[in-house]
Image (cartoon, rainbow, N blue to C red):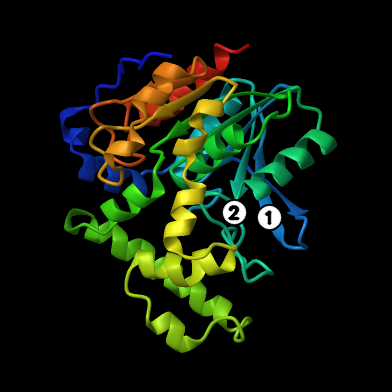
Amino acid sequence: MPVIESKYKPSFFFKKGFISTVYSGLVRRVKDVKQKRERITLFDGDFIDLDWSFSKEKTKKLVILLHGLEGNGQRPYMTGAAKLFNDSDIDAVCVNFRGCSGEDNLKYRSYHSGATEDLDAIITHIISEKEYSEIYLKGISLGANMILKYLGERAVVPSQIKAAVTASVPCYLYGSAKALHTFKNKLYHDRFLKHLVNRLKNKQQHFKEDLSIKDIASIKTLFDFDNLYTAKAHGFKDALDYYEKCSCLQFLPNIKIPALIINALNDSFLSPECYPVKAAKNNRYLYLEMPQHGGHVGFVDKKGVYYNEKRALEFVKQTY
């Protein structure tokens, strides 16, 4: 599909990518979302926690929401979307990736940008145990890459999955990794690294044969983290192998259900490859929207409802 002209026009204050990104990550609050937790067991004996919220009326429509790096099911960009969909008679389930629900996961491995086997397990569970005839996928950042990879890497997806919406997608992981290591992103880089290393220190207490304190002390950058832990714990040769195999960019031509990508042009986390114009023009199922503003997951809009959330609801309603 041709590239979509975006209608997103934030107030003057939120036109700066840094301000919209930081505000959305540290200041935004969403109230009145009641969630019910369900724990499911994965194929390897590990677990994932799902946080459900429901519409007032009984429905057979569901949106599955996936968070970004070091996020969880209670982040405002998750609960904000859940609330909007619930108010529109669509149930929502906020996925907490392995180790992200407030309790360490059981295995040495955790989650990563390409862990579509976990997404597949979640979808399989929902289809087999619940009664939803229409399922929509919405992902942010890391979770967005996972959704697009999932849709494009398999010949057939379950017929219940009708559409997907993704925002702030690092379609080319190596490019985004390089962007995060630049000086302009040092604040974000260091914050992510601190959280990841602290969690790795806790994991090391249970897996001393796999990881030493000396190993952790050697981690100075996110690239070091991916090279030492992410790649090795999940079966990749090194960080570059992980980035290459898990980037959704290569899978976009194969997507065969309506899928929308919303990537702001002032998102400092994204490299030029993360704006897949050619792929969108050559795939009638793939839609690309590139607002001038929005930063990284910072699509601040009126009345506390973010633009990417409004667009997600509009987009899935087109598939009814």
Q: Is residue 166 left or right of residue 2?
A: right
For the point 47% across and 58% down, the residue is 241
- Which quadrant of the view contains residue 210? bottom right
Quick check: can you spot residue 138? yes
Please give left or right for residue 15 compared with residue 54 in the image: left
Image spot of residue 160 (x, y percent): 72, 24
Quadrant for the C terminus in the image: top right
Outermost residue on the right side: it is 129
Question: Which label sits on residue 97?
Answer: 2
Report x, y in % for residue 142.
Answer: 47, 47
Q: Position of residue 240 (x, y in %)?
A: 42, 58
* Position in image of residue 304 (x %, y %): 38, 31
How packed mark 2 is, by other alpha carbons closer than 10 Å (few <14, some 14-19, many 20 or more), is: many
User: Closest to the observer: 162 or 209?
Assistant: 209
Which dot marks residue 48? 1
Q: Which quarter shows the N terminus?
A: top left
* Amino acid type indicated by mark 2: Phe
Camera-side residue: 134 or 20?
Answer: 134
- Label tally: 2
Neighbor class of circle 1 (other Cα within 10 Å; few <14, some 14-19, many 20+) is many
Q: Are marks 2 and 1 in contact (CB under 8 Å)?
A: yes
The amino acid type of the residue labelled 1 equals: Ile
Q: Nearer the viewer, residue 52 or 271?
A: 271
Vertical placement of residue 35 versus 4, above or below: below
